[in-house]
Image (cartoon, rainbow, N blue to C red):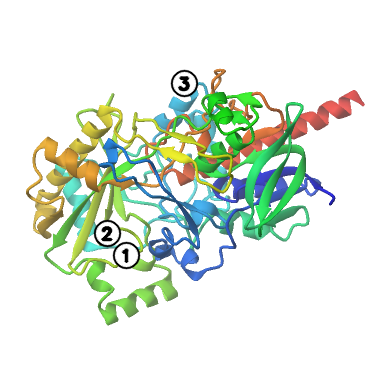
């Protein structure tokens, strides 16, 4: 059987992969193959903004990875859903669009990711964005991704923001502006009434291009490498093996769990690990799969005194009908919300140089987890996570079988400062809840409850009930040192024609939600590829 050749093969149609496919296919002479493990993103609940409540743990759209139990999570193990659908996790996430602190990217540059400081990545953020609030130094209007201010007002959320200001936090009407410090409403990736996923914004509009081929339900098994160069990929589809060759480059955009897994299966990783599973060592790269980071959150649930909770509204036929009309006729209301309506960033007594070290996420509803029914009482949820976790985990293959999930060890709270910071965050939330504008809004703290008061009790509550914020990054670290998995041009060290362009290259997790930064990585990565391509072409012309 003949093997088809493309210029670029992209593994993964998520946030970075969709942007890459869009940008590379702008040149009709470039042939691109885009491989996606999941199926098409046509389901209605994938399009409705609030639909993530139904989809994030639905195995039709998400692969649920199991993590290793540890002391940090109360020896429970935390399920990690990742989008297994066209658009990847951007098709099932909570829609919050926030870049993070400018210092996040300056930290990357200081750690050896030269060219990735805040001012250097800001143009790429602006390039992808169509912000409804207008363009300025921080925002773009000409990009494909529609970004909207919050379109739902809730009295309890408004009272919470006012109480946070009474506590001492400044109001902030743009977390993507000068600073994330303060409290206010979140911006969301919305286009009209619908979710603006990476696939709907970047990929679907160009699928008709003759130079772009999308193959779904393809499980990539390895990158083929010949004489030190990546030459293509192999995958399984419908139980059959397939392969394709890449004339220029193979790009892994499979995410922070599966990009390192594919590298390891391809012989790029810790030599001892690869030999243990009888995989030929192409490059001994000890850091492939290391540097795993995630945000861990603790939730507080209150019972409201008034019926200002969505828990009540969804059980009221008149209000439910009103929600539907607000969404259908005006593109606003509760059906347009994401995984947080209001929140912001603050400093605990562990913060360094006034840089916020915790983030809040506040919603006028309560639930055990997405996909389960809302509580029957008038619930209100405020969660907190540490912005800059120091704990590091790992991803390692458990077998040479590419269909078996890797061993994932998050090692939450292996660094003491992480737990100390989140405990302080819980205390600050309680102080906010006691402020004049909010203290009469609620009658009872359901979770963790009035009996949980000491630091030790709060620690136990955090370990035993907290969980992921789905911000997994870092396992193919970018840097300039020899141990970094990829260099600042996102090229895998030791192998030509192979890059990783996704959230796994982040040296450190951003302080806030990670999807905006992952889209930016795709945009900057495409720019690097195209610039190098133009340079090669110019050199060829000069030589001729």
Circle 2 sits on which residue?
368
Other residues around mark 3 within 10 Å, as few (<14) / some (14–19) / many (≥20) = few
Left or right: 319 with respect to 62?
left
Name which quarter of the figure residue 176 lies in.
Answer: top left
Q: Residue 372: which disc?
A: 1
Quarter of the image with the C terminus is top right
Circle 3 sits on which residue?
110
Furthest-bottom residue in this view? 318
Foreground: disc 1 or disc 3 = 1
Furthest-right residue in this view? 544
| Residue at screen point 59% across, 41% down | 523
Q: Earlier in the sequence, mark 1 or mark 3?
A: 3
Q: Give the Cα separation between the discs numbered 1 and 3.
A: 43 Å
Q: Is residue 333 visible?
A: no
Q: From the viewer's perspective, is residue 357 above or below residue 34? A: above
* Callout 2 secondary element: loop
């Amino acid at each position: 059987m003949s093997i088809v050749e493309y210029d670029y093969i992209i593994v993964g149609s998520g946030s970075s992969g969709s942007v890459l496919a869009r940008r590379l296919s702008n040149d009709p002479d470039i042939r691109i193959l885009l491989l996606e493990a999941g199926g098409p993103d046509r389901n209605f609940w994938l399009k409705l903004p609030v639909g993530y409540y139904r989809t994030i743990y639905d195995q039709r759209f998400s692969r649920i990875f199991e993590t290793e139990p540890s002391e940090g999570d109360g020896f429970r193990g935390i399920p990690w859903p990742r989008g297994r659908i066209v658009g990847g996790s951007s098709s099932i996430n909570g829609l919050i669009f926030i870049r993070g602190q400018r210092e996040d990217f300056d930290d990357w540059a200081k750690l050896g990711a030269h060219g990735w400081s805040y001012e250097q990545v800001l143009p790429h953020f602006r390039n992808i964005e169509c912000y409804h609030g207008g363009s300025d130094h921080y925002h773009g209007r000409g990009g494909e991704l529609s970004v909207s201010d919050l379109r739902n007002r809730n009295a309890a959320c408004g009272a919470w923001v006012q109480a946070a200001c009474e506590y001492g936090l400044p109001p902030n009407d743009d977390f993507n502006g000068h600073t994330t410090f303060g409290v206010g409403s979140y911006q969301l990736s919305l286009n009209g009434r619908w979710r603006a996923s990476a696939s709907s914004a970047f990929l679907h509009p160009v699928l008709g291009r003759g130079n772009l081929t999308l193959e779904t339900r393809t499980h990539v098994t390895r990158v083929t490498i010949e004489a030190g160069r990546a030459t293509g990929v192999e995958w399984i589809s419908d139980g059959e093996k397939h392969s394709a060759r890449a004339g220029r480059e193979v790009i892994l955009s499979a995410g922070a769990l599966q990009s390192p897994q594919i590298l390891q299966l391809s012989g790029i990783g810790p030599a001892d690990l690869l030999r243990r599973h009888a995989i030929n060592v192409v490059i001994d790269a000890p850091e492939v799969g290391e540097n795993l980071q995630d945000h861990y959150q603790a939730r507080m649930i209150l019972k409201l005194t008034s019926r200002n909770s969505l828990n009540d509204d969804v059980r009221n036929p008149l209000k439910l009908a009103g929600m539907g009309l607000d969404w259908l006729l005006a593109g606003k209301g509760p059906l347009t919300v994401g995984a947080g309506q209001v929140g912001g960033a603050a400093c605990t007594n562990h913060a360094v140089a006034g840089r916020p070290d915790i983030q809040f996420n506040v919603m006028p509803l309560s639930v055990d987890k997405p996909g389960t029914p809302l509580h029957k009482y008038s619930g209100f949820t405020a969660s907190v996570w540490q912005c800059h976790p120091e704990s590091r985990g790992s991803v390692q293959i458990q077998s040479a079988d590419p269909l078996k999930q890797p061993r994932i060890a998050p090692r939450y709270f292996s660094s003491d400062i992480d737990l100390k910071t989140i405990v302080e965050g819980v205390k600050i939330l309680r102080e906010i809840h006691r402020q004049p504008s909010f203290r009469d809004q609620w009658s009872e703290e359901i979770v963790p409850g009035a009996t949980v008061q000491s630091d030790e009790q709060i620690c136990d509550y955090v370990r035993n009930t907290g969980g992921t914020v789905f911000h997994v990054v870092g396992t193919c670290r970018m840097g300039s040192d020899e141990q970094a998995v990829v260099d600042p041009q996102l090229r895998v060290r030791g192998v030509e024609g192979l890059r990783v362009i996704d959230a796994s290259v982040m040296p450190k997790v951003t302080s806030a939600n990670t999807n905006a930064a992952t889209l930016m990585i795709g945009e900057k990565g495409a720019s690097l590829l195209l610039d190098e391509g133009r340079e090669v072409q110019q050199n060829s012309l000069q030589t001729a």
